[in-house]
Amino acid sequence: MAYTFEPIATLYTCFKEKFGIPRQMNLADKAPGRLVFHSDFAKTDAVRHLEGFSHVWLVFIFHQNMAKGWGALVRPPRLGGNKKAGVFATRSPFRPNPIGMSAVKLASIAHTRKGPELHLLGVDILDGTPILDIKPYIPWADAIAGARGGFADQPPETGLDVVFSPEATHQCRIMADQIPHLAATIIQVLKNDPRPGYFTGSPDYSDRVYGTRLFDVEVKWQVTDKTALVLSIEKTALAGSEL
């Protein structure tokens, strides 16, 4: 039997492309998101008492992967990007049903003339993602003591040290009022080393300059040994963020 689900909201985040999105929730705890309910669900009663919870679960659609299909085996980053694991043993976005879930911090609820909006932190979700459901995070039920994490049993090792060039430092200061926590978000994103696993440690990529879109800026950076050097932070030519 087939079922059809209607998204209840759209999530706007600082992540304008998949490259750079943290591979797990809350690895970049300053990364903001703004959840805007669709008109049929933008009801104040629907979020009554939600402000009493510090975190919420978001159930969402990997909307950019829907046409790409899935495979039984994937290459998870925690195995270096070359070893394979079963798709159901991973959080790969390439799934039979492209559904994801993430627990994020509920910073505040704004009540607008169009209905409530949720302001979130620690997001690891692409800008413009359709949201299927929201559920409160309940610590005593959702955090299971003694649970095993398979090949991802421990947090990822601290990846890269992040330093800013004089130019990037100057650009960041200019934008600080317009984009709160810009520097902190850049540091958290790059510290987690968003490069594919097979890039790390390979001399073939030692001179490569990477570009990551955050908010409405393009961050250019380069890696030497275990240090990410932020070269520049420039406004993009595309429309500004809805965040």
Image (cartoon, rainbow, N blue to C red):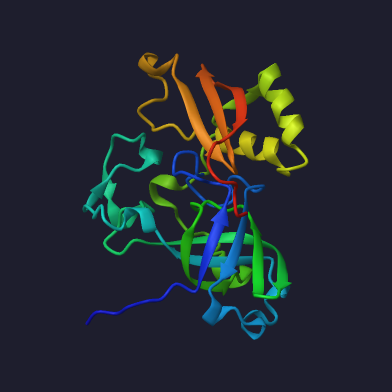
Q: Position of residue 81 (x, y in %)?
A: 33, 35
Which residue shows up at 68% across the image and 19% down it? Answer: 167
- Asked if residue 215 is positioned above or below residue 111 in the image, the reply reads above
Which residue shows up at 54% across the image and 67% down it? Answer: 57
Q: Position of residue 195 (x, y in %)?
A: 44, 31
Which quadrant would the N terminus be assigned to in this image? bottom left
Name the residue nearer the viewer: 173 or 208: 173
Which residue shows up at 55% across the image and 78% down it? Answer: 39
Which residue shows up at 55% across the image and 73% down it? Answer: 135
Q: Is residue 139 left or right of residue 181?
A: left
Which quadrant would the C terminus be assigned to in this image? bottom right
**Residue 206 location, quadrant:** top left
- Asked if residue 121 is positioned above or below residue 2 in the image, the reply reads above
Q: Position of residue 90 (x, y in %)?
A: 36, 52
Q: How many marks?
A: 0
**Residue 235 location, quadrant:** top right
Q: Position of residue 85 (x, y in %)?
A: 28, 47
- Asked if residue 79 is positioned above or below residue 134 in the image, the reply reads above
Name the residue nearer the viewer: 229 or 153: 229
Q: Is residue 176 left or right of residue 228?
A: right
